[in-house]
Amino acid sequence: MTWLLPRLLMAFGAALFGFVIGVAVHAVTGFQGLGLGIGTVAGVGMLLLVDAVRGHRLLRWLRGNQQDNAPRDTGLWGELGYRVERAMRDRDRAVARGRLELEQFLSAIEASPNGVLMLDAQEHILWCNRVAADHFALDPKRDLQQRITNLVRAPAFVAYLQAGRFGEPLVLGNGRGPGTLSIIVREYGEGQRLVLSLDITERLRSEAMRRDFVANVSHEIRTPLTVLAGFIETLHSLPLTAVERERVLVLMTQQTQRMQTLVSDLLTLAQLEGSPRPAPDRWASLDGLLMRIAADADVLSAGRHRLRLKPETGVELAGIESELLSAIANLVTNAVRYTPDGGDIELVWRQLDDGSGELIVIDTGPGIAREHIPRLTERFYRVDGSRSRETGGTGLGLSIVKHVMQRHGGELLIQSDVGKGSRFRLVFPAARVRQASDSALGDEAAFSVGVLSDH
Ligand code: ADP
């Protein structure tokens, strides 16, 4: 009630002013009634005039943009101005807060990996994030307020929106390029719709790969199993001589070994996929690995090839020794298996300027046609299926090599010319290559600590 006292004071001032005027008029004219009348009009007039001036000032401020403060009057008009100004400032703050929250909300949706699109009841686009714009080939600004079915014309999508049955998601080709989308629609508000799009290309691809993998494994196991079943049947039903029996048993052993190798390769792959990346602080001597590999290759080749597999590198590689052994051995074994008798197989180590290094397995075998090379590391991919199986191949060897190299931060590169031979290069990053001499001291110290702690 702070405005009441000034109001009363002003009324009192106006009454006093009227009284003074009335007395003056009475004194000049001698008419008491005239003095009373003019004094009253003067008092009321003054009150009205002051109110009109203050009211006008407040109105002028209200009509403007209210950037300045409201007129700072005392009394009723001052209080009114102050209250209106405060209500407006509160409203502005609430609007700004609401706008900020909306912006934050929209940028959160914008950051979503899924497409989000809002439609009104007439299927006009109210808003969409960048992912949705990409999925449906829309322009997030230009296409606002456009009818979605005019822009996304895929018949399946139009029919899905119009049918209004959104229980099951719609699977649709991506609007921009290859790929597949899963589309979910939810209704909200008064007929508005929220369209969510999810790129499921990768998921479908890995599902297809899993299906292919299971089919391939089943096929690979079924073949030797069928052969084994046939031999068992033969052993049961036919009276075989001792020699024939021995021959059947040898063939049965081969098929069993084939299944064992397959299962062992599958387990190796599963292990490679499931275990963490090898730490770069366990070092294995490359020459030691090559000695073992060369010995096995000698046995496998049985003198049919000229082998040069011990280049004496003096290098150590960081990683898991068994995995490195398996990768190199797979390449050397392949070279021996696929190179015809009399061919050359060589292992070369090359240290590169940036500290990285590569181990190259070179053979003078049949070579591989260019179109097969990118697919060689796929599981069960074979250029010549019968040759691979004849020589005990599973179709998983190069896939294992690629995995091992990826886990060790390196890569497998394949170069080949049909009729001339192949080069399989294992490239190791600098961080995983060192000269054995650089490490001799440190390792001796580590070794003696190890020996002491054993006792
Ligand atoms: P496999 O067990 O069939 O040898 P890999 O994954 O080791 O499976 O090799 C895939 C295919 O690549 C082989 O089937 C073969 O056709 C081809 N290949 C691999 N190494 C060589 C090589 N040194 N020379 C020619 N072809 C090769």
Image: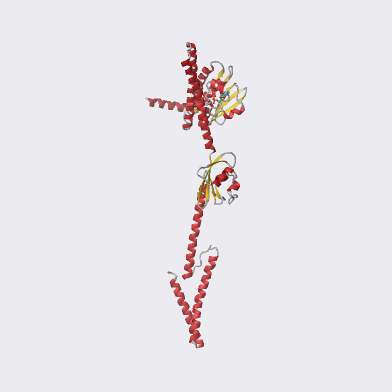
| Quarter placement of the N terminus | bottom left
Residue 1 appears left or right of 378:
left
Using the image as rendered, state which of residue 86 and residue 243 is in the foreground: 243
Residue 159: x and y in percent read 57, 45
Q: Can residue 434 be seen in this snapshot?
A: no
Looking at the image, what colour scheme do you see? secondary structure
Residue 23: x and y in percent read 48, 84
Residue 310: x and y in percent read 53, 21
| Residue that protrudes farthest toward the bottom in the picture | 30
Q: Can residue 196 be seen in this snapshot?
A: yes
Ligand 1, seen in the image, is in the quarter at: top right
Q: Is residue 79 above or below residue 430?
A: below
Using the image as rendered, state which of residue 258 and residue 77 is in the foreground: 258
Q: Is residue 115 above or below residue 29?
A: above
Residue 198: x and y in percent read 53, 42
Using the image as rendered, state which of residue 154 and residue 34 is in the foreground: 154
Q: Total of numbered circles in the picture?
A: 0
| Quarter placement of the C terminus | top left
Residue at 52 percent across and 18 percent down: it is: 300
